[in-house]
């Protein structure tokens, strides 16, 4: 009812990921008339932490749609107040477990509309607290940034500097319009969650977090150690990782090597190309080419390829597109570029200002030359997203204040924690978990072989349902329902087939 569906021109892998996990325009839009939430005027004159509720239904569950009034920047006594949305689903059976607060991926994405499997609602209330800058009264879209990164050759030195200027102009325009961007960091998100917990009268809670949300969950456990009983994280990694896609090129190359080993052991795949990484290298050297009027831009292909590698199904499709391109058919890569352009230009997909503020405020080495460091000679892809965003945001591109140094490092977490990651998770490679283990005092880490970022949640729902139910009710780890997963490098429908069908219409 309230979910968004990807448009048909975006390849499934990119649509499934929301693609760049990113999107910014000036804020201050009113709630839509069809909004299920209470009227924002109901908060007028009320104190911070005040909530108002409106009953309704969502995803076949009874739900409370709420508004909570919070300071825009808790670090300032004179901060103005702003409203955030949240949704509470009532337990569908016996309320035998603590309320479950959900922290989804991003940044730059909504935290309201994800539908969980039924088991998550069975024994507890489920609460989604909207992310400020996306789900609140103030929305940070900035479509001009999406337009800027749709330029051909976006990873060139000239275009990176041009993007930096666009970021700074957007930042200055927001500040001039009265937006306190220093109030849109992860610590403020943590305080928003705490404000809703208190307002709803809950004691101890449980957390379920994915991707970027796992870092919010970690910070919540640090700030409020007595309030969390159990925390289940999917697609987590060290704080040193910062955010999605910001790994060093050497680690990305090691992850690609893992795919190459699986590729070479697959008779059907290796028959099309004995070494998929050599095929990728060879094709990238031939670009740009044009197919059906679409310029197959090498920078867009690198960026789209990297994000397609998050999940095993989209990874198989993009590898297949490279094999076809080497044989003279670049239509699959053309569709990838078309999907890239549509995704970054669509303001409904991501909120660029939220992404950038979380990115920079979470910790950035302002003295590093990201442009060269993220694109070393000999690397297959380099680290294209890190090159794009860190280069543009540094050097004054997005000069938001960083969170205190204490929260940029790992501290001890006492809550019972379970981390479940995929072995082929490009967003959160298993190596990143090595830095996490010493910080968690009561933690189990499970690596599921041959699965990508959200594959561990998406591909075998019965397994994650069973694991989650036992963990939240009993605190035990039961992965017995997972069965061995094999990466199928032969897509059910190739990107080339999709491209040709699309252009026949």
Image (cartoon, helix red, strand yellow):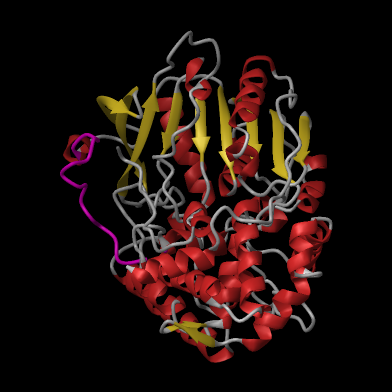
Q: Position of residue 193 (x, y in %)?
A: 47, 36
* Magenta stretch holds residue 219: no
Which one is in front, 197 or 163? 163
Picture quadrant where residue 227 is located: top right
Query: Residue at (18%, 41%) from the top-left corner?
Result: 34
In the image, residue 219 sits, relative to residue 8, either above or below, namely: above
Give the magenta part as a residue range.
23-39
Percent coordinates x, y for residue 475 in the rendering: 70, 19
Q: Nearer the viewer, residue 179 or 127?
A: 127
- Where, quadrant-wise, is the C terminus in this rendering? bottom left
Q: Is residue 321 above or below residue 117?
A: below
Residue 25, percent from left and from top: 32, 67
Q: Is residue 34 magenta?
A: yes
Which residue is rendered at x = 75% and y = 58% of the image? Answer: 268
Location of the N terminus by quadrant is: top left
Q: Is 407 placed left or right of 335 in the picture?
A: right
Res 130 visible = yes
Seen from the viewer's position, the closer of residues 45 and 98 is 98
Q: Nearer the viewer, residue 478 or 169?
A: 478
Residue at x 48% of width, y 40% of height: 191
Q: Which residue, as the protein is rendered here, is positioned at the far bottom?
A: 158
Instruction: State whether residue 380 appears in this view.
Output: no
Residue at the spot x=20%, y=51% of the render? 30
């Amino acid at each position: 009812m309230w979910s968004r569906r990807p448009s048909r021109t975006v390849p499934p892998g990119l649509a499934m990921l929301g693609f760049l996990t990113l999107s910014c325009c000036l804020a201050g839009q009113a709630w839509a008339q069809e909004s299920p939430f209470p009227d924002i005027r109901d908060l007028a004159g009320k104190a911070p932490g005040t909530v108002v509720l409106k009953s309704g239904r969502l995803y076949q569950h009874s739900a409370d749609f709420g508004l909570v009034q919070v300071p825009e920047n808790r670090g300032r006594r004179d901060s103005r107040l702003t409203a955030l949305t949240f949704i509470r689903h009532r337990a569908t059976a016996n309320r035998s477990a603590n309320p479950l607060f959900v922290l989804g991926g991003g940044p730059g994405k909504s935290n309201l509309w994800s539908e969980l499997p039924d088991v998550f609602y069975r024994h507890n209330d489920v609460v989604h607290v909207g992310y400020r800058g996306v789900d609140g009264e103030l929305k940070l879209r900035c479509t001009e940034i999406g337009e800027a990164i749709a330029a051909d050759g976006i990873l060139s030195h000239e275009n990176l500097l041009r993007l930096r200027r666009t970021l700074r102009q957007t930042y200055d325009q927001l500040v001039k319009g009265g937006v306190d961007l220093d109030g849109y960091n992860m610590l403020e998100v943590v305080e928003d969650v705490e404000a809703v917990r208190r307002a709803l009268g809950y004691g101890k809670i449980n957390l379920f977090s994915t991707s970027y949300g796992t870092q919010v969950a970690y910070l919540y456990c640090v700030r409020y150690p007595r309030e969390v009983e159990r925390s289940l994280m999917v697609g987590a990694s060290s704080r040193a990782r910062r955010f999605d896609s910001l790994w060093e090129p050497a680690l990305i190359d090691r992850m690609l090597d893992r795919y190459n080993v699986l590729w070479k052991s697959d008779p059907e795949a290796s028959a099309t190309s004995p070494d998929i990484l050599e095929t990728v290298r060879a094709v990238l050297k031939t670009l740009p080419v044009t197919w059906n009027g679409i310029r197959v831009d090498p920078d867009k292909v690198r960026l789209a390829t990297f994000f397609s590698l998050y999940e095993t199904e989209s990874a198989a499709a993009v590898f297949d597109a490279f094999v076809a391109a080497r044989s003279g058919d670049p239509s699959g890569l053309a569709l990838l570029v078309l999907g890239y352009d549509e995704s970054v230009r669509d303001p409904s997909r991501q909120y660029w200002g939220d992404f950038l503020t979380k990115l920079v405020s979470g910790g950035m080495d302002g003295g590093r030359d990201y442009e060269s460091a993220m694109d070393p000679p000999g690397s297959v892809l380099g680290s294209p997203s890190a090159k794009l965003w860190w280069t543009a945001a540094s050097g004054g591109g997005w000069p938001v204040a960083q969170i205190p140094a204490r929260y940029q490092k790992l501290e001890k977490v006492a809550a019972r924690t379970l981390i479940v990651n995929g072995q082929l998770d490009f967003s959160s490679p298993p190596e990143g978990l090595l830095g996490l283990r010493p910080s968690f005092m009561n933690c189990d880490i499970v690596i599921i072989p041959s699965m990508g970022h959200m594959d561990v949640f998406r591909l075998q729902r019965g397994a994650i349902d069973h694991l989650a139910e036992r963990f939240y009710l009993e605190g035990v780890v039961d992965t017995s329902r997972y069965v061995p997963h094999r990466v199928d490098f032969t897509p059910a429908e190739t990107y080339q087939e999709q491209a040709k069908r699309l252009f026949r219409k």
